[in-house]
């Protein structure tokens, strides 16, 4: 598990069921955080294969390209089973170990309601691994750690409209976000219709919608089951 430990603790850790989930859902937030000098990492739970036009080798190449475009501080994959991801004690232990070694201040995880079973399982897995991460008197690697904040991002498989806790302005980041999404050509381009609206149109237009909700060009939403505390009213000022 030593290869799962970054050089220094992360500020933000995105838990992605598959390669490309982080880019699609919070690519703009990642870029915004990196521009602010925050250390941001992504842990993929699976390698995303098999898919109709991908392979493990292709997905690794695409992920490397997207990682460079996002300027990530750290990225790794647990190689849990794609299409049959389950919240097991084995998977919980592996992800809890990542939390203990990365020590993120914020976790971004899939929303619990989705059409893709892997995404639902990933959301459940994050909850249980976050709890296990803080346990003492255990043989888990690393020191106990309770990631202070857990926020949820919306996926693309279920057309629902939960109310977010916050919407982050990603207007400056939209083009680079979309470049990172396009890096996954085997998933975004190959074999897909080129007639409007394409999958890429849908991803960009959703960001435009969320930007509209906050009076910005583009945005990305995050949900939270707990109240968000602020030390002053300053962050609420326009």
Image (cartoon, grey):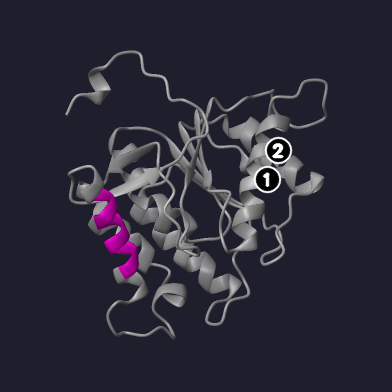
Dominant SS in magenta: helix
Give the quarter of the image for residue 37. Answer: top left
| On screen, residue 111 above or below 134 | below
* Left or right placement of residue 151 versus residue 92 in this view: left
Q: Quadrant of residue 165?
A: top left
- Residue 220: x %, y % from top left: 34, 48
Where does the magenta region start and end?
Answer: 202-211
Residue on which disc 2 sits: 128
Crowd band around label 1 with a 10 angstrom C-alpha radius: few (<14), some (14–19), many (20+): many
- In depth, the one of 200 and 38 nearer the eye is 200
Q: Please name the residue shown 60% across and 71% down the image.
A: 56
Q: Secondary structure at mark 2?
A: helix
How crowded pointer 2 is (Cα within 10 Å; few <14, some 14-19, many 20+) is rated as some
Residue 209: within the magenta? yes
Placement of 112 over or under 206, stated as above or below: above
Q: Which mark is residue 45?
A: none
* Label 1 element class: helix
68 above or below 40? below
| Mark 1 touches mark 2? (CB < 8 Å) | yes
Instruction: Name the residue carrying label 1.
Output: 125
Where residue 125 appears, x then y in whole percent? 68, 45
Is 75 left or right of 131, judged from the image as shown? left
Assign the N terminus to one quadrant of the image. Answer: top right
Specify the quadrant that holds the C terminus. top left
Vertical placement of 143 versus 177: above or below? Answer: above
């Amino acid at each position: 598990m030593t290869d799962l430990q970054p050089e220094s603790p992360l500020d933000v850790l995105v838990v992605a069921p598959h390669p490309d989930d982080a880019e699609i859902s919070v690519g703009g937030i990642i870029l915004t955080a990196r521009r602010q000098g925050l250390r941001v990492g992504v842990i993929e739970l699976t390698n995303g294969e098999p898919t109709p036009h991908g392979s493990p080798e292709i997905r690794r190449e695409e992920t490397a390209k997207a990682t460079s475009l996002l300027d990530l501080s750290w990225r790794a994959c647990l190689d849990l089973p794609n299409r049959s991801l389950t919240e097991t004690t084995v998977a919980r232990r592996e992800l809890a170990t990542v939390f203990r070694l990365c020590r993120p201040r914020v976790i971004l995880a899939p929303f619990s309601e989705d059409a893709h079973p892997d995404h639902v399982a990933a959301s459940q897995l994050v909850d249980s691994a976050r709890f296990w991460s803080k346990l003492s008197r255990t043989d888990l690697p690393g020191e106990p750690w309770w990631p202070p904040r857990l926020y949820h991002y919306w996926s693309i498989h279920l057309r629902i409209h939960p109310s977010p806790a916050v919407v982050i302005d990603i207007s400056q980041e939209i083009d680079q976000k979309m470049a990172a999404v396009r890096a996954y050509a085997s998933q975004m381009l190959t074999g897909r219709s080129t007639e409007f609206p394409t999958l890429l149109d849908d991803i960009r237009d959703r960001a435009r919608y969320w930007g509209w909700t906050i009076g910005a060009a583009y945005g990305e939403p995050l949900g939270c089951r707990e109240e968000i505390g602020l030390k002053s009213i300053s962050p609420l000022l326009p």
